[in-house]
Amino acid sequence: MTTKFKWLRLVAMMCLLAIVAAACAAEDDAGDEATDDEPTEAMEEEEPTEAMEEEEPTEAMEEEEPTEAMEEGTEEEAASGGDGEALSMAYVLPETGQLAFLGPPIISGFQLAVQEINEAGGVNGTEVVQDGGDEGDGDGTIANQTVDRLLADDVDIIMGAASSGISLTIIDKITGAGVVQCSPSNTSPTFTTYDDGGLYFRAAPTDALQGPVLAEQIVAAGGTNVAVLARADDYGQGLLDATEAALENAGATIAVATTYDPQAQSFDAEVQQVVDAGADAVAVISFDEGARILSTMIERGVGPADIIVFGADGIASGDTPELVDPDNPGVLEGMMTTSPTPASDEDFNSALNEFNPDLEDTLFAAEGYDCAIAAALAAQAGGENSSQAIADNMIAVTGEGTKCTSYSECLELLEAGEDIDYDGPSGPMDFTEAGEPSQGTYAVSMFTADGELEQVETVQSSL
């Protein structure tokens, strides 16, 4: 018992005895009994009895030693995510801007994944909560505003951005806050060696893999004197470099290899370089501004009806012909494209179509789905709903272990104490130490006379 508690107990007892003594004095016939109730010398000294000591808080109680029940509660809390908080997933993806056509499929893939995760019981015993916002384009102003809001809400992982250039404007803010970032569609080689503290991942393969595929297809189509026009950003420059190197290795001549300002009012000068160089093939590495480049190429006699024309994933969309000429759906007939494509997964395609029947494009939807599933499995493997748990286990759950292809299947294995190797609808992820797929599957497609983009074949590429 502390000195403070002794003093308070003594004061209280003396006050009580004073009241009792006064009452007894008023009753003459109870004098003897009152005498028996007067405090003895031992009571005045207030020596604690064994019972009194048991009633007072002991030093052990003040230090709040956990009881067995308290320890069980702590274990239950840890099993549900360490701090008991739900895993919070969010996205920064294009709802407006040049890549707005990528927003619906990727967002749908992400939301489908969250739905399936929660239907399977969530992560570490709690349901995933989700949020998201626009990445826009340009200088990344919109994306940064969205990231600021999401970080203020203490999210555990941010999926996006879709554009490599936009991701470079937000990656330091996200990873610097200790939050995981996973992009479904960043392909710039820059991210392979970027100093991200082990917090950046991507489900799309690097353009170091797509460049050789694009070059191989151009040469196979008969291109010998090739022009490459690429937007002047990290995506464009990275794919241009990889394609140019692969073309030279394949024995083709580089007629033109140049970048352009995607905000330019005219692309006459760049197209004129193609004409002047006598190129027999052109690769256009762009976003939707590529429609204006293609329109100018057609006007100058170097369009798909005249020479070999290829586009990369930024314009591999059924919307592109209408952007070139709304009155002529067959304006790009014969033009080819290359783009990362998921492995054939009819179950996923059916589930995605049921989730969002209005989807027109599915580009990078599977990668968006896999970013979310892999992150949830990583948190589950780490036993904690946190960014650090995701970062520590993301590579492990996509690599060596027992193969599994759905969240519920993988969850069952993890709960049984097994290591897992998650393969999703985008294909085997097999993340490298850089946090990216070690191989890629690419669709080679062609625009038809009806303005449709039809897949011709798929090609594998690996590091």
Image: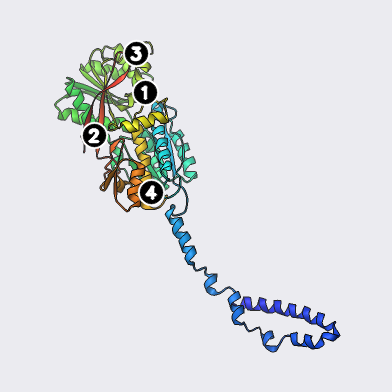
| Circle 3 residues within 10 Å: few <14, some 14–19, many ≥20 | many
Q: Nearer the viewer, residue 127 or 338?
A: 127
The residue tagged 1 is 288
Q: Counting residues from the N terminus, which is met first, the one under dot 4 or under dot 2?
A: 2
Q: Position of residue 38 (x, y in %)?
A: 75, 85
Name the amino acid, label 4.
Answer: Ala
Q: Are marks 2 and 3 in contact (CB under 8 Å)?
A: no
Tell me if residue 287 comes above or below residue 400 in the rendering. Answer: above
Name the amino acid, label 3.
Answer: Pro
Q: How far apart are marks 2 and 1 (CA)?
A: 23 Å
Residue 241 visible to the viewer: no
**Which quadrant does the N terminus fall into?**
bottom right
Q: Is mark 1 on a helix, strand or loop?
A: loop
Q: Distance between the residues labelled 3 and 4?
A: 47 Å
The residue tagged 2 is 209
Q: How far apart are marks 2 and 3 (CA)?
A: 31 Å
Tell me if residue 321 comes above or below residue 188 in the rendering. Answer: above
Name the amino acid, label 2.
Answer: Leu
Q: How far apart are marks 1 and 4 (CA)?
A: 37 Å
In front: label 1 or label 4: 4
